[in-house]
Image (cartoon, rainbow, N blue to C red):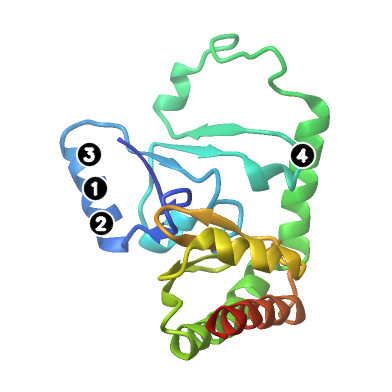
Amino acid sequence: VFIESIQGEGGIFPAEDSFLQELRALCTERSVLLMLDEVQCGIGRSGHFFAFEKSGVKPDAIGLAKGLGAGFPIGAIWAAEPYAELFEPGSHGTTFGGNPLACAAANATLDIIEEDSLLEQIMANSSIWHAALQGLVEQYPQHVASMRGVGYMVGLALHTDSSAVTTAARDKGLLIVPAGHNTVRLLPALTATLEELAACTRILGEVFAELSA
C-alpha cells in the first residue's frame, strides 16, 4: 500500500491519524508493506520532520525528495528492517544515484533544519498564519470555501476559478499553484518569517477583494 501522508497534487488533504493507524494495523494483519510518500509533505513542511509522525504510525518504507535537497535535485527511499535487507549492494543503483554534491546538499539541509530549530518555528508561525487565512475564508465566502492543511502546506478550496486567483496573485508578486479541484496550494519556504506569511495573506486578500469588485 503506497499513499501520501498529505495529498499534494490532489488538493492538500491530510490523512487523519485514525486512518493511518487503522491502515497500519490492516497492513500488519495482512502482511502487506505500508509505504508512505513524503516527497512533498516531508522534511519539515508539516511542522513535523515527517508528516506521518503525529499519528504515531511506523511505515515500512518512506519516499523522499524535494525538500531533502532544499532545491537541489535528490530523492531517497528509507526502508525499515527487515525490508532494508532486500536492497543488496548494486541492486538499487541508478546512473547518477548517490551523487556526492546532492548528498552534501541534503546533509546541509538537515543540519540547518536542526540547528535553526525550523520545525519549532514552523509550528509557531503556522498557527498564526492559519488563523489569518481562516479570516479570508470568513471575509470572502463567495470566493473561498475552506482552508485545510498543516504547517507550511496549506490549500484554499475555492468557489472561484483557481487559475484566475493564481494569475492575479502572481501579478502581485505571490507565486502559488493550483491543485486538485479548484484548490490553490500555499507552500512557503521552511524559512518563511511571520512577516512573509502576513504578506502572503495580505496579497490573497487583495486578490479576493478585486474579484469581488
The alpha-carbon separation of the residues under discs 4 and 2 comes to 33 Å
Which residue is denoted by mark 2 in the rendering? Answer: 19
Q: Residues within 10 Å of mark 3 (few under 14, many from 20)?
A: few
Mark with earlier residue (4, 3): 3
Disc 3 residue type (three-letter): Thr
Give yes or no for contact between labels 2 and 1 (Cβ–Cβ under 8 Å): yes
Viewer-nearest residue: 171 or 34? 171
Distance of mark 4 from mark 1, alpha carbons? Answer: 33 Å
Task: State whether residue 73 appears in this view.
Answer: yes
Q: What residue would you read off at disc 4? A: 72
**Total count of labels:** 4
SS assignment at label 4: loop
Q: CA distance from mark 2 to mark 1?
A: 6 Å
Mark 1 element type? helix
Q: Which residue is mark 1?
A: 23
Q: Nearer the viewer, mark 4 or mark 2?
A: 4
Q: Earlier in the sequence, mark 1 or mark 3?
A: 1
Residue 73 rendering spot, x and y as whole percentages: 72, 34
- The spot of residue 8 in percent (x, y) is 48, 51
Label 3 element class = helix
| SS at circle 2 | helix
Residue 25 x %, y %: 21, 47
- Horizontal side of 105 relative to 80 (left or right) equals right
Q: Amino acid at mark 1?
A: Leu
Q: Is residue 7 left or right of residue 42?
A: left
| Quarter of image, res 80 | top left
> Where is 54 relative to 139, above or below?
above
